[in-house]
Image (cartoon, rainbow, N blue to C red):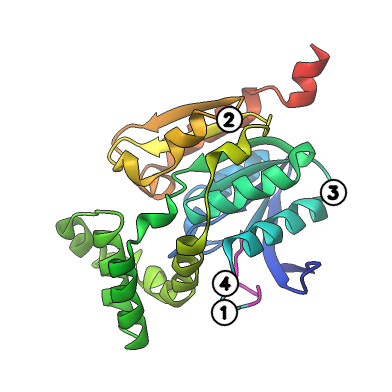
Amino acid sequence: MERLKTPDGIVVSYDRGGSGPALVLVHGAFSDHDTNWTFVKPRLREQFTVYAIARRGRGNTSATEGHTLDDEIRDTAAVIEAVGEPVFLLGHSYGAHCALGAASLLPDRIRSLILYEPAWPLLCAPGLLARLEALAAERSWDAFAMTFFHGALRVPLQELEALRTTGHWPPIIADARASLGDLRALARYRFDPSLFRSLDVPVLLQIGSESPRELYVTDALAAVLPDARVEVLPGQAHEGMTTAPHLYLDAVTAFMLTSPTRSEVAAS
């Protein structure tokens, strides 16, 4: 993995592969730079030079305590600056907030932005977060993940039990400790969609048709962003890039390769 040190003194790592225009990926919780994109990264690398960021506590990136979502926004911005050219920027879940914030800091470095289901900060109500903290203190990471997915994301227990029998579950458990830091940071984050009214870059806001739409800030952003559209992935929930990789890939690549950038619109 490649590394850089941010102005805040944090080591941020990322893997790079492929060829073509630069594409920066920012993963969500309960995943990392690899597992979030397992089924889509190979094809993305056929058309883009992909920079997959490992957020704090993953890969070779600094594992910190008490960091904020704004801290990870600055981490993401540091990678974008290091790329040295305008980038396509794609974020999932918590990583979508990181991508959105970084785009607002560096709009001239963003060709287009894709956000898959960034959650409202109160996704974990105080009572649920307290239960998760108690499970983390006991290192009951399996119960921790089950409680989050069922209590916060409203995934049916039957689906979770089926997921536990697959190879997808061990990486989720392995990332649970780092994900606790994500949940703490999200709970403290003051999200105000009006702050993004001036973000004049093409934005694709993706959401699964099976996701509880009210959990995510998708519609709040669609109401304020000057150049945004909402796309619903049929039959999918919060992990569309894993459950329907071809559907997801077709959607994101079509948007990135056909949406005009701000400079192209100005020149036309």
Choose mark 3 or mark 2, whichever is in front: 2
Q: Quadrant of the C terminus?
A: top right
Instruction: Give the Cα distance between marks 4 and 3.
Output: 24 Å
- Disc on the earlier residue, 3 or 2: 3
- Disc on the earlier residue, 4 or 2: 4
- The residue carrying mark 2 is 225
Q: Main secondary structure of the magenta part?
A: loop
Query: Does 31 appear in magenta?
Result: no
- The residue carrying mark 3 is 84
- Counting other residues with Cα less than 10 Å from the Cα at mark 3, is it few (<14), some (14-19), or many (20 or more)? few
What number is the disc on residue 65? 1
Name the amino acid type tagged 1.
Answer: Glu
- Disc on the earlier residue, 1 or 3: 1
- Percent position of residue 180, x then y: 44, 72
What segment carries the magenta color?
54-62
Residue closest to the far top: 268
Instruction: Give the Cα distance between marks 1 and 4.
Output: 13 Å
Is residue 38 shown to the viewer in this render? no
Choose mark 1 or mark 3, whichever is in front: 1
- Disc on the earlier residue, 1 or 2: 1
Name the amino acid type tagged 2.
Answer: Leu
Instruction: Give the Cα distance between marks 1 and 3.
Output: 30 Å
Choose mark 1 or mark 4, whichever is in front: 1
Residue closest to the far bottom: 138
Q: Quadrant of the N terminus?
A: bottom right
What number is the disc on residue 58? 4
Residue 268 shown left or right of residue 202 in the figure: right
Query: SS of the residue at dot 1?
Result: loop
